[in-house]
Amino acid sequence: MKLLKLVPADTNIQFINKRLIAFVFSGFLVLGSIGLFLGQGLNLGIDFLGGILIEARTDGPADIGQLRSDLGGLGLGEISLQEFGSPVDVLIRIQKQEGGEAAQTAAIEAVKAELGKRIVEYRRTEFVGPTVGAELREAAIYAVVSAILAMLLYIWFRFEWQFGLGAVLALGHDVITTIGLFALFQLEFNLATVAAILTIAGYSINDTVVVYDRVRENMRRYKTMPYETLFNNAINQTLSRTVVTSVTTLLALLALYAFGGEVIRGLSIALIWGVLIGTYSSISLAVPFLLYVRPDRGDISAAGGNATEAAE
Amino acid sequence: MIHIANWTKVMIVMICALGVIYAAPNFFERGLFSDVSAGLPGKQMNLGLDLRGGAHLLMQVDSDVIVKDRLGDMMSETRGILRGAKVRYHGLAIAGQTIVFRLADLATIDAIKDELEAQYQPGNFAALGAVEPEVIVEVGDNGSFTLRLSEQGITDRVGNAVEQIIKIMSARIDPTGTLEPVIQRQGRDRVLLQVPGVSDAEVEKIKKRLKTQAKMTFHMLDQTNSIEAALKGRVPAGSMLLPSDELGSDGKPIRYLVQKRVRVHGERLIDAQPSFDEGSRPVVSFRFDTIGGQKFGKVTANNVGRRLAIVLDNKVISAPRIQSPILGGAGIITGSFTVEQTKDLSLLLRAGALPAPVTFLEERSVGPGLGRDSIESGKIASAIGMTLVIIFMFVFYGLFGLFANIALFFNIALIAGMLSVLQATLTLPGIAGIVLTIGMAVDANVLIFERIREEVRNGRTPISAIDAGYRRAMTTIIDANVTTLIAAILLYAFGTGPIKGFAVTLSIGLITSMFTAIMVTRLLIVVWLRRTRPQALPI
């Protein structure tokens, strides 16, 4: 049987020579993301901002305009309505109410009373009061920061510091551009997004580690090979694996995006982006970066991480 | 690497078999094996509220009210001690979080201090091992006393109140025992309630029942002073203006002037039932305990012809005229009630008053319809994702891809089995975690197979190529998975609810995928090698 090969065995793409293109492109992405984050800001969901979210099924195709003007009359501040997955499903978002937690409960009752018989089923009612919103925001920041630090420590422990720095650079790039994506398209940024960002961080490091492992192995084996060639070989040798794993993960995620339902669509988008950007950054940023910090070959065999060597 | 000890083989097969056995019940109707004891196969995965439908409500107990109530009690206790000791004192009052007073005769200071400290010594309070007394007694100049609630004292009081609230809430939510509410204390003064499978209307009803403190007191209406004067702001000392549910001619709620003195406390009620009066109007009939009945009898006997005020949470719900003494300890509450309201009120009265009111901090309710849809779409997404990955792996790696696919099957079985055994909660993001794992699980095999391909190209024999492929890919696999595992564990530590579910399936998936990719495919390949002794590898 003739097997499919996405990446031919003799592939030798000059990634290292083209590194400046990637650096400029990534610099543009990162600066753009920061600009969008500061300028446009994130579309924070009720998890972090506090507020009310109601998903309701109407008795016929929802008349969003009518609903908006009816609910607008309640004086609850900013209300956003959108069709959610099907013409009979509406997602109603109401800003955090002044007057503490009790005011949120009262607002939900007012909205449900106003909607009355037009709604055949309340599919979801969520509200987050100001106290919990602030707590969740804090927990999310702790989670992301401590996860990145913990991964940095692990890489530091397993590799030389140069690798650790490169991995975290690529990781930071992936996390920042993911946040940029959410700012650009104003996708709702909520707890699930934080989960996605942490998973992306894990995937990004995972991908970088695979290529770095190969770099380290080649550094031990070819003591005199110039760094440019050595790094380029490592990328090309692992390219097939990189592509295959990205494809299988993307296949699974695309299924999730298409069939997983409206509620986790945001999570799927973030993960799909994360796989793409994570794959790109380990090849085009993490490895070429090593050229500028030049890990010491003498240290490699002396320091830890010689499991592969010992096994030979 | 191509030699696997016999006991290892047995272990691999056993683990896979256990995974399948423990996962299997999930493919049957829900609840079919509900009476299986812990640890045995038969347990089904625990579905989160976002999949079953249900309500998640986080509440905050108003601990200020508890402290204020306690200070009120302490003042009466202190007054009792001072009166009992027959000493002269002045200025007894609540000041912030303390009780203050001053003794007129300085010679009595020591005796009073001893008596107060004895009243509030640690052993007096239920908390086991509490070293700090509940109340700290400080004596200042000129016989001035300050009684301060200690941190420990406040914490214990609040804790007791929260426990009591949890008991009362269970009685209120589930009087018939058909729901399966889980009510837990969270932190110092929070209560988390989770009720599976309730509709939106039921959630709103539950919220109303929880929001009501249901503190009922019986007072006399103040009929000696003019209500008009009180409404203009001249409320006599000893009385208070309270609103009611009835609307006056001006469309505003009618207000009553009520004596502050509580004649009978609602705590004395032992039963309350919805019923109807002679005019077939819905009423609540109630019964006091012996002491309450005696008090109520005395009050009604002394006040025939005057009006009683039945006050619930600072609102007059009924102000009937006392026609004749009520001596049997039972009575009815009339008012403008609907049948539904009398049912609710009697339920609240039977369950008892909350020691402090609660506010809702967070609500996440999912209707049963959305839950069902989420399960359905989760199943479809997993099935399609898995099919795509399986086809891809087979097209790409042929026979070896088939081995990886078998490993993937056992991987899913192990994840499902682990979730069932641990009774971990599967949430919608958790399903996303499983789908993601399906995609990432093959990574370890991809690493190994790519390495084998490379070794074959370098001219190694099949056996040596497979051996080298596994050995060299191993460190990479471990490094790569540990980093993702770190992210998943931190996500579990900081995440809440559904996100924790994502972290759980992701972590379990990482561990099981390492096992299946390394052990299961290796076993399959080794067996295949022995059987066929191939000259070239079909990879």
Image (spheres, coloured by chain):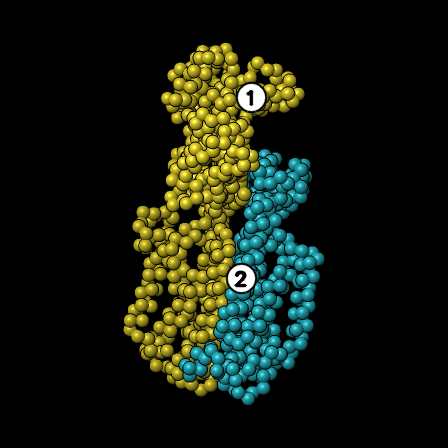
Chain colours: A cyan, B yellow
Query: Quadrant location of the N terminus of chain B?
Result: bottom left
Q: Which quarter of the figure has residue B269? A: top left
Q: Is residue B347 left or right of residue B252?
A: left
Please name the amino acid that badge 1 sits on.
Gly
Query: Quadrant location of the C terminus of chain B?
Result: bottom left
Residue in the foreground of this view, choosing between B106 and B395: B106
For the residues bearing labels 1 and 2, Cβ distance under 8 angstroms = no
Circle 2 SS class: helix
Q: Residue A91: horizontal and vertical position, in percent?
A: 60, 46
Q: CA distance from mark 1 to mark 2?
A: 59 Å
For residue A146, which numbered disc appears in the image?
A: 2
Q: Residue A162: horizontal and vertical position, in percent?
A: 57, 76
Residue in the foreground of this view, choosing between B334 and B378: B334
Q: Chain of mark 2?
A: A
Residue in the foreground of this view, choosing between B111 and B327: B111
**Residue at left offset 52%, top offset 60%:** A255
Q: Which quarter of the figure has residue B195? A: top left
Q: Which residue is mark 1?
A: B238
**Residue at left offset 34%, top offset 81%:** B533
Compared with B215, B282 (above or below) is above
Residue furthest front in the image = B107
Q: Are marks 1 and 2 on the same chain?
A: no
Please name the amino acid that badge 2 sits on.
Ser
**Label 2 crowd (10 A; few <14 / some 14-19 / many >=20):** some
Q: Quick check: can you spot residue A270?
A: yes
